[in-house]
Image (cartoon, helix red, strand yellow):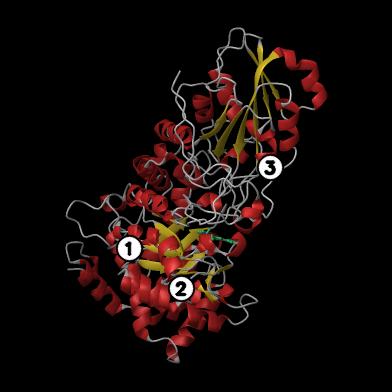
Amino acid sequence: GGARYKDPTRPLNARIDDLLGRMTLAEKIGQMSQIEREKATPDVINKYFIGSVLSGGGSVPAANAPPEAWVKMVNDMQGGALSTRLGIPMLYGIDAVHGHGSVYKATIFPHNIGLGCTRDPELVKRIGAAVALEVRATGIPYIFAPCVAVCRDPRWGRCYESFSEHPELVQNMTSIISGFQGEIPAGGRKGVPFVASGGRRNVAACAKHYVGDGGTAGGINANDTVATFHELLSLHMPPYYNAVIRGVATVMVSYSSFNGVKMHANHFLVTDFLKKRLRFRGFVISDYQGLDFITTPEHADYLLSIKLGILAGIDMVMIPFNYTEFIDDLTLLVQNGTIPMSRIDDAVRRILRVKFTMGLFENPYADTSLAGELGKQEHRDLAREAVRKSLVLLKNGKPGDKPLLPLPKKAYGGSILVAGSHADDLGSQCGGWTITWQGFTGNNNLTAGTTILDGIKRAIEPAGTDVVYAGNPDADFVQRNKARFDYAIVVVGEPPYAETFGDNSNLTIPAPGPDVIRNVCGSIRCVVVIVSGRQLVVEPYLDAIDALVAAWLPGTEGQGVADVLFGDYGFTGKLSRTWFRSVEQLPMNVGDAHYDPLFPFGFGLETQPS
Ligand SMILES: OC[C@@H]1[C@@H](O)[C@H](O)[C@@H](O)c2nc(-c3ccccc3)cn21
């Protein structure tokens, strides 16, 4: 009958050995190449034996593309791969880091900083399973998630992608991997790549960014993590222990350096530690142009970059555009003996192991049968539950006052005031990695969701109470009207950002937030809700504020904020990060010898459902 590797009844390693033994160098190097979808025509995939394709942030087949369009795009590319001599299926990857963020009408869940505040690994696992279904709805089998960074400095632009500053909390949240990929069956082998259900309702995951991405000096993105090996192992490595045991299929290398050595060129940490000591058996993927950035300036010596990266132990390269240069240079390096064939074979073996294990050979094509999973109400309800559990109540009533929260749903003075830009801004409440790489602001129809203001209006009992919204009320407006309002809800915060665009050394609430707080809270009992990717400077305003809530980046289900503000549910969230008094204290993390926080790690007031 057909070639042994095509026979799913044969042992995994027999299939790998049979296929590897048939492959030319060009076919092997093709498997190690991941290109951007803009370049990935069926012909290019066929001609260069391309093994993987990605969507970078915001790279979509069309604006507001429905699931069917995604499925068609992925399947057309797959046709190019399956028509090669050996018919090895290609693997399509995308960043689904808080839901299927690039896709129109996907459910957008709270970013990881908020999920860490839920302290609920089971909830987070359920989120992983829901995200996997929404990703599969679009025909995609692989995601560049979860980020398991241990962010040690909130000045880092990616701190919201980190579950916590505390390694143990991040370790607990690796349960999301078992949601994405499926749970290893009882008695099943741990520590080997695992994707359940024959790759129909689960996706291959990616623990990132290996290692120490959250520990860079000053929180400067992609910079240098200066630490002892012991500090690295105790602070940044622990989530990878859990990820490997849970069968994570892939690991992505960090742009950052460890004590001045680029992680993308770090043979000791990638090969000796991750592959040998931790016995990681999946494949290691570079970050986007990660090889180019090994040199300064980037791409200054691509042959050297490839040599260092591949010899360090990188198996798949997120090139992602100039694939002919990569393929030609790697071919040259193998043919002149710089890179031994054994290294190439190890890389290809790992890639094939993941593709066989996840059922990609048996199910290379997607279908539209799961289209209804995208943005399904059950997933939105799950996201709303996550929003409720992620909010942290930091203050509830001034000294001597009775608590302000939960708020009454009726205002006996006739009105309540909602103020602040972030009350009515779906894009800002979602944050980065939403529809585009950097995210968006406003309520345009770029995706579907419920703003915090929408949620407040639905919670308020219609009769006899009107909700007045003012994005940026001045002192005069408040003075003239304050008697009308029983209380005010002030929602301020950060604009969306991603990666280096989020690096920030002052962490002040962006204007006009502080003015809105002062104008409103100076005259009306107020609860301030902060929508942000991290802790911000609040101490100067704290005395004027009656109640303070950290909402992080809640995503599309803004209703969850109203649920706890109005007491349908109690506040239960606990800080996943230390809330500093001032940025001069940073970095300052739980366990530090000198620890003088405004609100400590683990802090969170509770309220009872009313
Ligand atoms: O989207 C793919 C990966 C993602 O998985 C990584 O977490 C992230 O570090 C990343 N940055 C870029 C990227 C950075 C600058 C310009 C263009 C793209 C691309 N990517």
Quick check: 433 left or right of 339?
Answer: right
Quadrant location of residue 208?
A: bottom left
Q: Residue at x 45, y 50 (%)?
A: 72
Of the image marks 1 and 3, the number of the one nearer the N terminus:
1
The x and y percentages for residue 75 are: 42, 55
**Type of the residue with mark 3:** Ile
Q: Residue at x 24, y 75 (%)?
A: 17
Q: Residue at x 48, y 87 (%)?
A: 332
The x and y percentages for residue 306 are: 50, 79
Q: Quadrant of the C terminus?
A: top left
> Mark number for residue 48?
2
Of the image marks 3 and 2, the number of the one nearer the N terminus:
2
Residue identified by numbered label 3: 509
Quick check: 54 left or right of 342?
Answer: right
The x and y percentages for residue 488 are: 66, 22
Residue identified by numbered label 1: 355
Q: CA distance from mark 1 to mark 3?
A: 46 Å
